[in-house]
Amino acid sequence: MRWIGVWVVLAAGLLAGCGPDKSSPVYQRKQAFKQMLRHKEAMLGMLNGRLPYDAKRFAEEMRQLQGVSDKPWPLFTELDSSHAGQDILLQPAAFRQAQQHYQQALAALAAVPPDEQGEALRVPFKAMAASCQACHDRFRIE
Ligand code: HEC
């Protein structure tokens, strides 16, 4: 009986070792990015016709995107086991600038009053999405 207990403890330990460490900054920043992606995709869907355009829902997705958009940056404390490029630590000013560029594009989008078709949102939405991409091109690695 005692041996069975030992095996159970060992197996549990192994399983815990394999799963993601949910308290790690790498895990947490990836979760934040996934949320950002979800809101951005919902907004894109409403602007390209994949989803019906709904000004109220768009505003809500926007609000949630803004809410999560400052979460990832303080979590870049370690780069191991991630897709974060070395330049994040080597060129912190450039990384900060890419964050600011994104936050400005996001604020510009949020400042657009919603209209019936979302027409006015397309150009500033594209600029916001381009600022995600610009940072990925520079600071995210394969
Ligand atoms: C200032 C730089 C920067 C901006 C702006 C940025 N990202 Fe990222 N993003 C990164 C970096 C760096 C990684 C790699 C993180 C890692 O592997 O730890 C990443 C990773 C991701 C991931 C993958 C997460 C995972 O599970 O591995 C997604 C999805 C993502 N970003 C979405 C977005 C979206 C959507 C936006 C804009 C709304 C955005 N990002 C804006 C730098 C940025």
Image: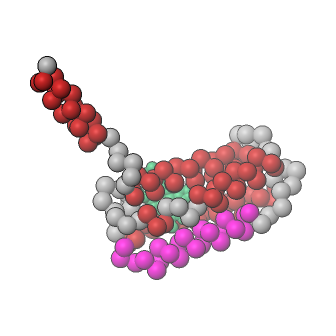
Q: Is residue 70 left or right of residue 85?
A: right
Quarter-wise, where is residue 112 in the image? Answer: bottom right
**In terms of secondary structure, what is the magenta stretch mainly?**
helix
In the image, residue 22 lies at what x, y percent?
Answer: 39, 48
Residue at horizontal 78 percent and vertical 40 percent from the top: 52
Residue 45 appears anywhere in the view: yes
Camera-side residue of 23 and 72:
23
What residue lies at 26% left-to-right and 42% top-to-bottom? 17
Applied colour scheme: secondary structure
- The answer to whether 15 is drawn above or below residue 47 in the figure is above
User: Is residue 93 part of the magenta span, yes or no?
Assistant: yes
**Where does residue 141 sit, x and y in percent of width and height?**
38, 60
Give the x, y percent position of residue 119.
Answer: 82, 55
Q: How many marks?
A: 0
The residues colored magenta run 89-110
> For this view, does 115 lie left or right of residue 67?
right
The residue depicted at 35 percent of the width and 45 percent of the height is 20
Q: Position of residue 63 (x, y in %)?
A: 70, 56
Outermost residue toward the front in this view: 2
